[in-house]
């Protein structure tokens, strides 16, 4: 996708738009500084598949889909400020009736239950 004239690709961890860069040998890669991950695409098959994904991001408007999904499925802990995607392993239910209380913050030494409110 062209965003300000650059090709962009979402971080697979935090979904932040990342600028697609090229190595000296013209191989694509992305770096997400907040997450600390780097993705290097090395072989021709992977490069072709990656380029197809980057091109489809614009046609399918991946960025609009991510903007729609993120507020519903990515929470912020009110205690430590850690942002995280909801997942089954973080579900916290009531001991008494089994109802959903929220999701346990995966932040180190936090464990606060963050309530989940369906936004429509």
Image: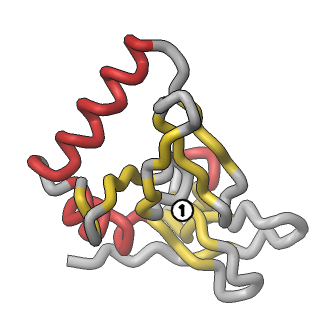
How many residues crowd around disc 1 within 10 Å: few (fewer than 14), some, or many (20 or more)?
few
Q: Is residue 110 left or right of residue 94?
A: right
Residue 120 at least partly seen = yes
> Compared with residue 79, is residue 92 higher up or lower down, i.e. above or below?
above
The residue most toward the left is 59
Q: Quadrant of the C terminus?
A: bottom left
Answer with left or right where residue 17 lies relative to residue 79.
left
- Residue at the farthest right position: 109
Q: Residue at x 28, y 35 (%)?
A: 53
Rendering quarter of residue 5:
bottom left
- Secondary structure at badge 1 equals loop
Taking the spot 54% from the left edge, 28% from the top edge, the residue there is 25
Q: Where residue 69 sits: x, y (%)?
A: 30, 63
Q: Is residue 73 or residue 111 the one in the foreground? A: 73
What x and y, as percent, mark residue 28? 47, 36
In the foreground, 1 or 77: 1
- How far across and down, in percent of the image, does residue 86 sit? 51, 58
Kindly identify the residue that appears in the image at 63 percent across and 54 percent down.
90
């Amino acid at each position: 996708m062209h965003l300000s004239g650059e090709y962009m690709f979402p971080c697979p961890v935090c979904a932040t738009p990342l600028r697609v860069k090229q190595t000296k040998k013209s191989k694509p890669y992305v770096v997400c500084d907040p997450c600390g991950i780097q993705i290097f695409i090395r072989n021709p098959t992977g490069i072709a598949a990656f380029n197809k994904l980057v091109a489809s991001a614009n046609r399918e408007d991946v960025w609009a889909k991510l903007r729609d999904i993120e507020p519903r499925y990515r929470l912020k802990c009110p205690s430590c400020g850690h942002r995280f995607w909801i997942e089954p392993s973080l579900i916290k239910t009531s001991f008494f009736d089994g109802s959903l209380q929220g999701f346990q913050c995966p932040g180190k030494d936090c464990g606060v239950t963050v309530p989940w409110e369906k936004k429509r």
